[in-house]
Amino acid sequence: MKVLVIGNGAREHTLAWKFFQSKRNTGVYVAPGNAGTEHFATNLPNISGLDPDQVIDACKIHGIDLVFVGPETPLSLGLVDRLQEKNILCVGPNKRAAQLESSKAFSKKFMATHSIPTAEAVVCTSLEEVKEYWNNHKKKIVVKMSGLAAGKGVLESDKEQEILDFAAKGLKEGPLVLEEFLNGYEVSLFALTDGDSYTLLPTCTDYKKAKDGNLGGNTGGMGAICPVPWVDSKLLQKMVQEIVEPTFEGFKKENFDYRGVVYFGVMVTDKGPKLLEYNVRFGDPEAQVLIPLILNDFCNLSEAIATKTLKNLEVRISHQTALGVVVASPGYPESYKKDLPVSLPRPNQQQLLFHASTYSANGTVYTSGGRCFTCVGLGDEILTARTSAYSVATSVTFPGAWFRKDIGNRVFGQ
Ligand code: AMP
Ligand code: GLY
């Protein structure tokens, strides 16, 4: 089977790496890919997932059997709809279902219709409405742009002026969602679905803040663990009953033809789990720790999702733990340096090194993004996974490279 992965991040490197291991692999292509994927796959640097015509042409030229769409933007623009019209198998929801991520106004309405617990929220389209909401609450709230904002569209604040300034800017792009601030800890839950049945994958957690101790600015994610040691079976069962099941029932009632990955961003509060958001794809860096633990042949699994035969397949998961540490460029999550030459270690059997938007020139790898690498350690215990991951992270060297030092610490009471 020939597979095309859309994207250039560490998540897509992980997907391509997993497809490469399939017994059915007769070619892995990545558009546009990075300096990590070029070692075992064919990068298509001039093909953009944002242009369905380019992707369709590439599928024809290379005889692609299945497309796996990594990031949200091509999904929200309807790439899957166009590929399905051409009878190309795809993993990823169509444009209508992708609104669950691309419009927070849409997803909040879906949650309300299907009684899924979430933060209380209102949609505002004017500054007057924002002021009115603030005047009625006057405590820490969360202001979110309704559309895709690559993790930059959220403000948590209890300062009127800061809220109004953020809102004034955000309203230029579209409606805003204002909601109560929820205290708790976050869990990322992933399910694979073919629209008829679903399979839940092990729990993940993502370290979203830039600095140790969960301080500093929001990032795309600086580290991850899978499975999460502090989520017990009772909590998992509650999340399934109150959030996952009603979501898939809602998909059926609303006739979503959803064949792909559903990401539930859950806040565990003292009043129970609440759904913060849906994403319509794997998380990054969660994919880098979750996918290595899936034991199934990835061509078989992806084909089952795309052809609505998932119920015939048993998803098998490794007993190991995976821990990932993201190595970032100096300045990230604010403006950051690019084109930095990198020296990379050679990972051992229990270590994985995934690139994010790197490129190579004359035999040297260069950075070109903010989050540059995810270093993953695998182990029977989280402690060994952690040691393995950090030994890779400390050996990835480029000027100003940095990473959080506390991924997984909570487990050790730190
Ligand atoms: P979202 O785009 O909805 O995932 O929000 C991005 C991040 O902002 C989440 O992962 C949380 O860390 C934080 N966040 C969003 N909504 C809330 C909320 N209602 N209460 C507390 N934190 C939130
Ligand atoms: N790790 C958060 C995300 O992928 O949205």
Image (cartoon, grey):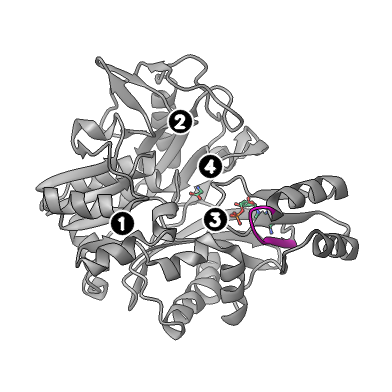
Q: State the CA–CA distance, disc 3 to disc 2.
A: 26 Å
Task: Answer whether residue 220 is magenta in the image.
Answer: no
Tell me which residue sits at (12%, 49%) in the image.
61
- Give the mark nearer the N terminus: 2 vs 1: 1
Magenta extent: 172-179
Q: Are marks 1 and 3 in contact (CB under 8 Å)?
A: no
Q: Nearer the viewer, mark 3 or mark 2?
A: 2
Label 4 CB sits under 8 Å from any ligand 2 atom: yes
Tell me which residue sits at (40%, 19%) in the image.
395
Q: Which residue is mark 1?
A: 317
- Give the mark nearer the N terminus: 1 vs 3: 3
Mark 2 is on which residue type?
Gly
Q: State the CA–CA distance, disc 3 to disc 4.
A: 15 Å
Mark 4 is on which residue type?
Gly
Find residue 369 and name its label: 2
Q: Position of residue 262 (x, y in %)?
A: 43, 63
Quarter of the rendering containing residue 335: top right
Res 172 visible: yes
Ligand 1 location (quadrant): bottom right
Find residue 187 and name its label: 3
- Give the mark nearer the N terminus: 4 vs 1: 4
Q: Is residue 65 above or below residue 13?
A: below
Q: Residues within 10 Å of mark 3 (few under 14, many from 20)?
A: many
Q: Which residue is mark 4?
A: 220
